[in-house]
Amino acid sequence: MVYKASHQTPRHPDWLPLAHDLIERLRLHHAGRDHLISDTPKEATTLEDVDKSLAELFEAFQDDRAEKAQHIAEPWAPIPLRKVLTAVRLAAAFGTEEALRAAKRSGAMTFLTDIPVEDLNLVSEVIRHCFPNGGWALTAPGVSDGAVSKSAEAKFLRNLDEIMDAITPVIALLPVGLRLPVHLQHADIPAFRLPPISADILIAHLQAGQLSELLADEPALRRALPDDALLARLDTSQVLAALRAPDLHTVVKRLLAITRPATADGPRLEEMTGSGPALTAARRLVDDLLAWKSGQIGWQELSRSALFFGPPGTGKTWLARAMGNSAGIACVTGSFAEWQSAGHLGDMLREMRKTFAEARRLAPCILFIDEIDAVGSRADNDRQGSNYRTQVINGFLGEVNNIALQEGVILIGACNHPERMDPAMLRAGRFDLKVEVPLPDAGTILGLLRQQLREDIGDAELKALSHRAVGRSPADIDAAIRAARSDARHRRKRLTAAMLCDHLNIGSDAENMDRLWRMALHEAGHAVAGAALHLGQITRMMISDEGGQITRLPRQTESLLSDIEDEITYSLAGRAAERLILGDISAGAGGPAQSDLAKATEWALDIEAVYGLGCKGPVWHGQDKQALLRDPVIEARIRQRIERADRRAGEILVEHRTVLEALAGDLMRKRSLDSDGIYRHLCGIPSVEETDAPHAKHPVEAPATG
């Protein structure tokens, strides 16, 4: 395809003559004629030239003509496309020959920055080929296995300090992510940035190649090319894959294909219902990012990182991708497990740096790091592998610090167990926001179902299904939908809600309403007691076939004996609610180490053995405290405390029985309640103050199971 000439005059960048000159120099080098490359600019003829003898001038003319004749007669050696592309980018970086001439002056130092690590050796090679007699020292950090190691970076910086003593001009090549020492940053040293791929660079490259004869209408080609913002995301290999084509139409088609935003498909925040803390935080981050992109706010004015934590399958990865889609930017992903699979420590750190470098190259973008808790903490008591953990964590912290200095990269981390992470990884500046991503409530599940099933199942059925699916993760629901669609295809039937229920292990049998009512009363008992004791805002309640869950915000206390006894009372309030309304109790308060009875026992035992508030006096028993349970005296005191708290919980619930039953009934109908729905019930309890309203504060949630 030929882009035919139009009446529109093409605009040419100021650096285009320098690009042509550098490409000509590459041709001479690859033809083995480096001696024809002149690093001295041509000067105008002066009167002194006239004084030269005619014989000398004629002899010089004859020699030059013979050299040129031989030069023209011999075929050109092909120039690698990547070198031509690099030469054009170098011309765009320096702009004019005068800038290069200034870099050759005695004592001059020049920085060429933002070079992709994979192009570092290539840029160095092209500069040497274009200027074989440049007269400068060219220095760059060593690249090993596609990355600049910490030792190579340190050696490079030391070398920069050493060559300060020399009068030889220096060009220093800085890869993406490498930051200079402060004394060099503020030394007013000329710095040129290697520009990303753009339409100007591509067209200059095409003009120097075999497709130049088809480039009759440059403005039409510009209109057909992707935007510069999309072209800037391409690396050298991607561009070369597109340019290796028989015609311009194919070039444009390939470029459009590889620059098509990966965010075009997939989840979007706008499609989700609900107002959970994670979804709210994600929406705010995206809104701020869009405001920054439009120039309404500065980069320093927005939160630039968040850690999403919660049980597996709750949609942390989905949330990060949805953020990228809604913001219209790329989402770069990495994980500690993926990095560690590369091999030994050096390989792992190399892969980590590659991920961060990719984010810097694609900025603005979302950088999503999964499984951050996999590496552990430097304070871990397990000495085996402690040196490995320390180096990995130090490397990660260094990359996070560097990425925070670059505008346009939003860092999102995800993990299941934030308590296992190194404290330095959690501080503000590394992760500004720490937000729990719990299992979805009925409203969020309904949004997921509508997004994928609105054409297959009626909305009334989807609403009923969303209530029964409470307790399932987004991953569970997504897998069930795929399996149900497979069933429908193989049975050659329409997809039904019953098929989906089967794969969600909900079953088609009628629900056990008595069991659900007991669970609703149990969780409501916790909520009412927590409100009466002013233990912190209840933010979420949920019941499902598999059990109940309640979440409240932690309360800062003075750790008095009465504060601890309040916690014991709260732990036993679910059991007390069952006894008050149903006349008996179930085993739901007991069981695993995180059960209500386990927590109440732990609190009571800590009073005696850890906090110095019991019969043992100010003696700390530490890890031996469990042995105290076999002491009849201690066991009796613990039982007395628990039974006293149990009676106290019952008294509180009797006083607020109307609120208890109303809250349990609402939870029974909806299966999940958010902070607003809970507050509407609990605001009738006198001790709940206006400051506990959901809109009053936004701390991090701390989950507590019921």
Image: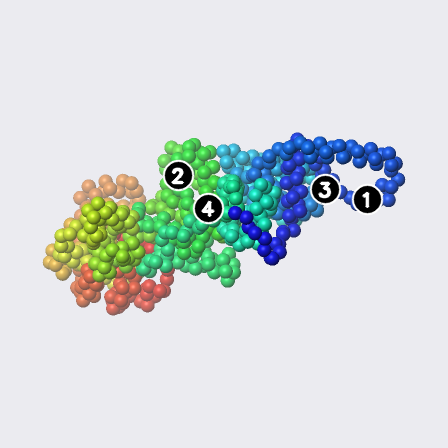
Task: Choose the circle earlier in sequence order: 3 or 4.
Answer: 3
The amino acid type, in three-letter code, at marker 4 is: Ile
Q: Report, in whole angstroms, how far the alpha carbon at label 2 lies from the one at label 3.
A: 47 Å
Residue 408 visible? The answer is yes
Res 268 → quadrant: bottom left
The amino acid type, in three-letter code, at marker 1 is: Thr
The amino acid type, in three-letter code, at marker 2 is: Glu
* Circle number at residue 392: none
Of marks 1 and 2, the one in the foreground: 1
Is label 4 in a helix, a strand or a loop? helix
Q: Report, in whole angstroms, how far the alpha carbon at label 3 lies from the one at label 1.
A: 24 Å
Q: Which residue is at 79% across, 45% downward?
A: 44
Of residues 491 and 261, which is closer to you in this image? 491
Task: Choose the circle earlier in sequence order: 3 or 1.
Answer: 1
Of marks 3 and 4, the one in the foreground: 4
Is label 2 in a helix, a strand or a loop? helix
The amino acid type, in three-letter code, at marker 3 is: Arg
* Circle number at residue 105: 3
Q: Is residue 212 left or right of residue 676?
A: right
Residue bearing mark 1: 45
Res 560 → quadrant: bottom left
Residue bearing mark 2: 338
Q: Report, in whole angstroms, how far the alpha carbon at label 2 lies from the one at label 4.
A: 24 Å
Residue bearing mark 4: 258
Task: Choose the circle earlier in sequence order: 1 or 2.
Answer: 1
**Residue 195 image point, x, y percent:** 57, 47
- Could you classify mark 1 by the number of other residues whose Cα lies within 10 Å: few (under 14), some (14-19), or many (20 or more)? few
Q: Which residue is at 34% across, 45% downward?
A: 417
Task: Choose the circle earlier in sequence order: 1 or 4.
Answer: 1
Residue 556 visible? The answer is no
